[in-house]
Structure formats: structure tokens, C-alpha cells
Image: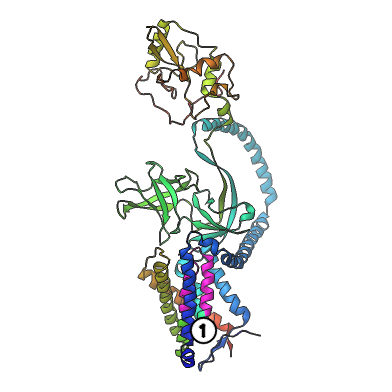
Amino acid sequence: MESVLGRYRNLIILVGVLFLQVLGLAMQVKKSGNDEEKTRLIRVWAVDAVTPFERAVVWAQNGSSSLWHNYFYLRGVRAENRQLKEQIEHMRLEQVRLSDDAAQARRLQILLAFKEQFISRTVAAQVIGSSGSDLSRIIYIDKGKNAGIEPDMAVMTSDGIVGKVLLVYPSVAQVLLISDQSSGVGAMLEKTRLQGVLRGTANGEVALERVMSDEQVQVGETILTSGGDQIFPKGLPVGKVTEVGSGKDLFLNIKIKPAADLSKLEEVLVLIEKQEQPAQSEDAVHLRASDILAQRLPSVPDKPAADAKSAAGAAGTGTANAATPLQTPVKPQITKAAKTSSGASSVHITPLPEPRSEPADAASTPSRKSDGTAVPTTAPTTAAEPDAAPIKPTAPRPKSGSPSTPSSPPPNSQPPVDQNSPQ
Amino acid sequence: MPITYTSGEQVEVYRFSFPVTIGIPLLALFVQAFVPLRFPRFAVYFDLPLLVTIFFAMARRSPISGLLTGSVIGLAQDMLGHNPIGLYGIAKTVVGYGASSLGVKLDVENAGARFLVTLAFYLVHAAVYFTVARGMVNMTQTWSWPHGIVAGLANAFLGVLLYFLLDKFKQRT
């Protein structure tokens, strides 16, 4: 027996070591739901062993680069400084003009751009390492739990999304790139709004899956995040379609070129706080189109039936114009006229459309800037007449325009309101 | 006192000092993790920890120390990724055992033999990894002979250069 053990000692040890590793592997696979937690400690050891070297190299690189750029390149800096000061004077003048334009653009953008989500806080981090294997496409960044980073946070660059945080250590975090096979990102095509799942392939490419083969997808079309994965905010750039072919089953095989260069990542942004709310300005909250119109109008007096009929005719053809100065008898609030059962005509007055759901007593919202006389005239009428189909005033129409089918805004859109117009 | 993992076989057996035994594999892991940040294709074609495993296994000529070296380096490489720990461990254990067993029987000191041994063990490593990853972990893996051959040749070429560099650290028993 001893001779057999001695003779096959090496083989027995090999089998034993392999068996132990297979056993460990099997335990991880069986508990795949939280195997990362089970193996977290030993991964921490490995990361702690390697990342100090990587930090040191990155630090040395940056230091030498900084020394070069901040010392050797500073020759002749005084002359350049004078020149730059002159440029600054010119630019200040231009800045005043541009700031006015920018302020106006911002106001218009706030009113017209409807973002469902926007990024409120990000943390910049430097890429300090990778897994070193093409079978595990991850990177390490030099910010971790101490910087507020947590698992499943989105990581991006200014060009597009990069991946998500997988594991977080005190001062280091592991980021799973979107090109990894185990990665999955909710994405959609920008033009057609077709949604799919973004996945990495075995050879490191990125593909959009789950798009039916009967859909039309153009090469070069932009891919955006759909927000469906609850990690990436909706609308972030993902990449462009480079190839469209038929894939498995009934789905297309769509290859994507990521917007962010995943092979040359140096600095990334980690989205540590995703604030989801409809885009709106504070002004938009306090001052709505109906308020503005209400302030312009002293009140809407009770009109005789004849006036109501003429008004109804005007409203029925859709000539109400929210942006037209309200000096004419045709008011945008007057949307429909109908005869009551007693034969008398009644005028239905509806407020301008609201982009969001409001409390039932929206007229009493303190933030509304309405005087006490005008608002009650316009606001409650709709609730009293649920069958009165209001014609939503849309963007200003040309006076000679066709009365049929005014273009409707998106359901959650606000009417364009020029807040700078005279009250 | 230097730590040795020699088997005491008839052929010439080498040992390595403790800093080299620890430092070289760590350096290989570090370079393997860092260089792809600047040269992304490096990780696709080169596997420095594998080359270090083969070198130590062939130099020590002890199957037990070879498989243990491969196991430790492989597991460390696994820890840096996000896949289940043990995939590289198993593959490099087999390679360490095989390389040291081969080192006992063959002269693996010349460049030609080293080139062929490295090429062969790269393919063995890839095959074991592929088998375990697909068979046990159910990972999506695609086997590509062209990629395997090209990467094997690249590793063999780099390995021959690296082995001559690492020969400087050998100590005769």
C-alpha cells in the first residue's frame, strides 16, 4: 500500500488539489446568487496585493507628466501670461453678451426640453487596473466606499456609458464593462425607440439583443440607454450601430461601437446619486401658462349665448392661440360651446394643459402666482364638465394655418410660454 | 535562508530565493493587470502568469511544487477577475504539473524546446479553461483555433525571451 502511495504520490496530490478547486468552484456555482459575497474576502486580498503597485505606477506617471508640463513647459510663460490677460479682457466683453444669450437659452431649454431623469452627482475616478484577462472585462478605479461608491452604480465618461460598479472596497472599486459577457444594459435605438438588451460578446464586442428581426435598424443609428435596468439613467449615449444581421431565433444581431472608448479608459465618472424627476425649472413650477393667461385677463365674464356661439365657432376651428397677446375677444381658454337641455348655450372654459398630474385643488397651490380673481374663473371649470373635450392649445399657429389637426405636444409636455413677455 | 521546492531528481534542479519566488509571480500578475490599460490587445494574446508558472515548474522539476505554484498563481489570477475562483487555478495547476513532469524527462533548457513546450502548454491551458468554464460554470465560451494558435505562438515567443531573463535568478542546488 505504501509503495503504491509513494509511486503515485505526485498524481495523487495533483488529483487532490484539482478536486479541492473543483469543489470550491462547484460551491461558487451552486451559490451563484451571492458568490461574490462568499469570495469577497479572498478577492480583497488579491486586490489589496495588486492595486498598491498600480496606484504607485499611475502616481509616478502623473507625477512625471506633471513635472514635465508644469516645469519644463513654463519657459516663456510671462509673455504668454500678458497675452492671455489681453485675451481675457476681450473675452469678458464677449462673455457678457454670451451670458445673456445663454440665460435665454437656458430658460427656453428648461421649458422645452423634457428630461425624465438627470444626473445630479458624480464622482470622478481614475482607472488604475484591469483584470488582465479578456475573459473578464473589468477595470479597477481608485475610488471606493470611502468616496460614496456602492455596487450597481453607473460608470460613464463624457462620451458614453462604460459599465457598472460590481464590487466596492474601501478605496478601490471593480467596474464591470459593458463589453463583458455577463453585462446587461437596457438600451434603445434613438430614432425608432426600439428597446433591447446590450451585452458583451466573447470577443469583446458589444451587441444589442432582443430586437425582433422584422424591425428596421439602420447602420450608424445611435443607441441610448433606456433606463429599464434601473442602473443607467435614460438617454445616455451608448454607441452606434455598426452592423446589422440576422441572429438567433427571431432576433437581429446588432453590433455596436461603444461611444466611450473602452480600451483606453483613464478617467471615468461614477454616478453616485441618480435623481429621477421630470425636468422643470423652479419658474415653471410657480408660473404656469394658465397663470400667465389668468393674470392677463381680469376675468372671463359671463357671456350671452350669441357671443358664446361665436366664441365656440372660433374655438372649434382651433384658432385659439396661447402665445397671441390677449387683446382680441377670442380667449384661448374658451374651447367648446354646447347647448344645454334648456336650449341655452353654455361656454366651457378649460385651463391650459398641465404637464403633470396636479392635486385636485391645484388652484389653491400656494406657488401659483395668480391674483384672486382670475384663477377661479379658469381652473375649476374642467372638473365641472368632464365631458367637455378640451382642445389643447399647442405651439403658436400661423394665423392663416389650416384649422384641422393641430400638432399635439407630448402628453407630459408643457405649452411653450414666454416668461419674458409683458404681463 | 532560501526556500526551495526541489524534487531531488537526477537532472539539474534549480531553486529560487524567497523574494523571487513571491515577487516574480506578483510582478507578472501586476503587469498582466496594468499593461492592458495602455495596450488592450495584450490581455487577448499574452498570459504572463502562465509563462511564469511554466518557467518555475520546468526549473524546479518537481511535479508537486509545479502544481502548487500553478495553483497559487492561477487562483490569484482568478481573484482579480469576476469569474468564479478556480478556473485559472485548475488550468494552471494542470499546466504546472505537466511542465514540471516534462522538465524531469526532457531537456527544456534550449530555446527551441522552450518554445514548443510553451506553445503546447498554452493550448493545454486554454483547453482546460474552456472545458471547465463550459462544463462546470456554464459560461459562454467560444473555441477558436486561429486565436489559440496565434496567442500560443505569441506567448511562446515572449516566453523564450522571458525565460532567458528569469534564468538569471536561478540558483543551483
Q: Disc 1 marks which residue?
A: B64
- Specify the farthest residue to the front: A1
Q: Quadrant of residue B125?
A: bottom left
* Residue at 37 percent of width and 44 percent of height: A194
Is B78 contained in the magenta span?
yes
Q: Is residue B66 above or below residue A103?
A: below
Q: Is residue A311 visible?
A: yes
Q: Position of residue A188 (x, y in %)?
A: 41, 45
Residue A345 shown left or right of residue A419 in the figure: left
Q: Is residue B109 visible?
A: no
Q: Position of residue A135 (x, y in %)?
A: 45, 64
Residue B114 shown left or right of residue A420 in the figure: left
- Specify the farthest residue to the bottom: B10
- Specify the farthest residue to the right: A78
Q: Position of residue B170 (x, y in %)?
A: 57, 85
Q: Quadrant of residue A408?
A: top left
User: Looking at the rendering, in which quadrant would you find the N terminus of chain B?
Assistant: bottom right
Q: What type is the residue that disc 1 sits on?
A: Ile
* Residue at 61 percent of width and 84 percent of height: B3
Describe the colour scheme in one phrase: rainbow
* Residue at 48 percent of width and 67 percent of height: A27
